[in-house]
Image: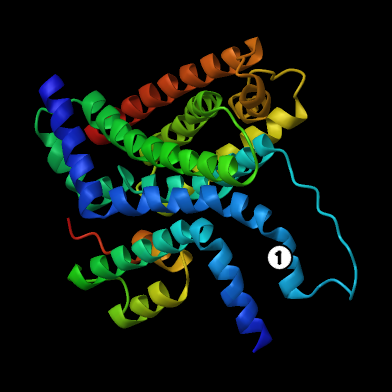
Amino acid sequence: MNMQWMTIYKKECLESARNYKWVWVPLVFILFCIMDPLTTYYLPQILESTGGLPEGAVFDIPTPPAANVFMMSISQINTLGVLVITLITMGTIAGERKSGVAELILVKPVSYTAYVTAKWAAHVTLVLLSIFVGLIASWYYVQLLFGDVSFMYALITAAFYSLYIILVISISLFMNTWTKIPGVVLFLTISIILVLNLITSIFSHLLEWSPTTITSHLPALLRSGEVGQDLWMAALITILLIISLLFGAIQTLKRREIV
Amino acid sequence: MLLTQNVIDFMNENLAIIAPLLIIQLVLMITALVSLIRAETTKGPKWIWALIIIFFNTIGPIVYFIFGRSHES
């Protein structure tokens, strides 16, 4: 079981290397993360050069606090980053089932659990590495251009945010076992995330520990370094959801492939 | 003329800040081009992908990596 798991995990990582994913995904996340700190810093010059202001107008743009600028990078990952994550995971199982590779692998005595969790782990490794590299780059620019943000607190913030991102990967993997069409996986995953956000904001008094609330706790965490009880609970719920999604994905795949 | 002078001044003052951004964009573009050249087949003509990668900064390489490569594994 363990040998098998490592083999699939290594195969996935090797494939990511062949597709240049180990190069381009981290680079793209660095770009997403440093875009906002840079444009915020150069905003006065950008406004001046586009000439939107009348002659002699003095327009004071207040410099945002350093912690807010770091949070801009996280919200960039929350939109563009989540889209890229879903795009690179949408075909991981669905595509292999469509092309018949999955049948080839699963004909051998490979357990479904190993197949799903190793694939999941390979994607989690790649994406988390990219996010950490990106956020460290963002922290560096924030430190350089805006002011002090504790590196330790930034790391803790990134760690809690990672849980939400792992959930996104898990939703995508789960959807991979439901349909063989990658585009449908993309659509379903994004829809679920949007609906989850919507429901959480409508029933905010009932769903205090919804996974999407993790992001709203992060600014306070970044400033104080203290993990509040609500954040712990949201993190716990997120972990439970991730485990259920993986379990669900394994069960669905079993039922589909045996038929 | 005045504008180019301004741009040059601006770059001289801010090169240390902007250089990493430019380098990352360049590396991304080169990686995409290397991948394109080494790929046996792509979805759509190669020369169009080359233009997209070169002229659409950041977005071009991403779109190529996600949609351009045909799965030959």
Please give the chain letter of the residue carrying mark 1: A
Q: Quadrant of the N terminus of chain A?
A: top left
Q: Residue at x 43, y 68 (%)?
A: B60
Closest to the observer, A114 or B9: B9
Asked if residue A93 is positioned above or below residue A117 in the image, the reply reads: below
Residue where numbered disc 1 is placed: A45
Q: Residues within 10 Å of mark 1 (few under 14, many from 20)?
A: few
Asked if residue A41 is positioned above or below residue A209 in the image, the reply reads: below
Seen as rendered, the residue at the extreme bottom is B1
Asked if residue A125 is positioned above or below residue A182 in the image, the reply reads: above
- Rendering coords of residue A176 (x, y %): 37, 41
In the visual, does A149 lie left or right of B60? Answer: right
- Rendering coords of residue B46 (x, y %): 29, 78
Asked if residue A160 is positioned above or below residue A106 in the image, the reply reads: above
Q: Is residue A1 visible?
A: no
Q: Residue at x 86, y 60 (%)?
A: A59
Closest to the observer, A135 or A116: A135
Closest to the observer, A162 or A247: A162
The amino acid type of the residue labelled 1 equals Gln
Q: Quadrant of residue A12?
A: top left
In the visual, does A51 lie left or right of A240? Answer: right
Q: Quadrant of residue A208?
A: top right
Q: Is residue A135 visible?
A: yes
In the visual, does A64 lie left or right of A156? Answer: right
Q: Quadrant of the C terminus of chain A?
A: top left
Q: Residue at x 22, y 41 (%)?
A: A13
User: What's the colour scheme?
Assistant: rainbow
- Rendering coords of residue A151 (x, y %): 52, 29
Helix, strand or loop at mark 1:
helix
Q: Residue at x 44, y 31 (%)?
A: A166
- Rendering coords of residue A72 (x, y %): 63, 43
In the visual, does B14 lie left or right of B63? Answer: right
